[in-house]
Amino acid sequence: MRALIVSDLHSNAEALRAVMSRVRRKRIDEIVCLGDFVGYGAEPNQVLDVMRNIHGKKLYIRGNHDRVAAGLDEAESFNPPARQAALWTRGRLSGPNRHFLRGLPQGPRLHEGVMLCHGSPYDEDEYVFTEHHAAQILALYDAPVILYGHTHLPVVFSIDAHRQVSGVAVRDEKTYRLNRESRYLINPGSVGQPRDRNPAASFAVFDSKRFTVQFFRVAYDIEKTQNAIVKAGLPRILADRLTYGT
């Protein structure tokens, strides 16, 4: 499997277009999305139309913002700007896109030994930031690779044959050659709303044959995305934070 791994698109059509343009000439067998297709941004239908209509094999799971926008939750745990954007999205989805969101499976989802989840494998709303938390998850699940999103931070956690857990935040573009005697918890970062102080869209390509994961960053038209958010009447903070990747 050579898979394009994306997560946390958050209704950012410009960022998604930039990602798809970057990988156009790469050999990709399938596309994996780890949830949060929508939320925060002002272009949910544009993003969902692209993701629904991509040709080839697709492996998608839902995120917490997808759940709310689909009407499956009322976002009581969301902060006010996030809740406003999620409910705004709910009221503007096309019929096919609403049906698509409602039908997304909840993680975890297993595929060829790889586990897909949004937050943690046991809670799609749970953030995984630390080595201690990663160690708990890697002790509970024996999948060689767990792919997750939700934090918007590209990172690789690993546990080796001696049960030593380590984690590394991924800066810029980098390729990791994984060890088959270790197990991994990997986050590709966010396409639509990076939060590692790098405003460029973040994604990864996982190659199960070579056992590598390659991280990419791609610039996109942030100002156009911000203008769409402001024009839609969404909270200004959702536009401003894109400038700084926070």
Image: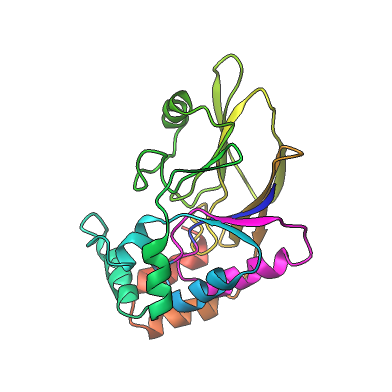
Spot occupied by residue 28 in the image (x, y as percentages of width and height): 72, 57
**Vertical side of 73 occupied by 109: above or below:** above
Residue at 66% of width from left, 63% of height from top?
Answer: 56
Front-most of residues 67 and 204: 67
Furthest-bottom residue in this view: 231
Spot occupied by residue 181 in the image (x, y as percentages of width and height): 66, 22
Residue at 39% of width from left, 85% of height from top?
Answer: 231
Q: Is residue 115 magenta?
A: no
**Vertical side of 32 occupied by 91: above or below:** below
Spot occupied by residue 147 in the image (x, y as percentages of width and height): 54, 43
Residue 219 shows in the view = no
- Decide if residue 50 is on the left or right side of residue 29: left
Q: Is residue 18 magenta?
A: yes
Q: Which span is picked out in magenta?
A: 9-37
- Decide if residue 9 is on the left or right side of residue 176: left
Front-most of residues 99 and 36: 99
Q: In which quarter of the image is residue 177?
A: top right
- Decide if residue 106 is on the left or right side of residue 17: left
**Vertical side of 198 occupied by 231: above or below:** below
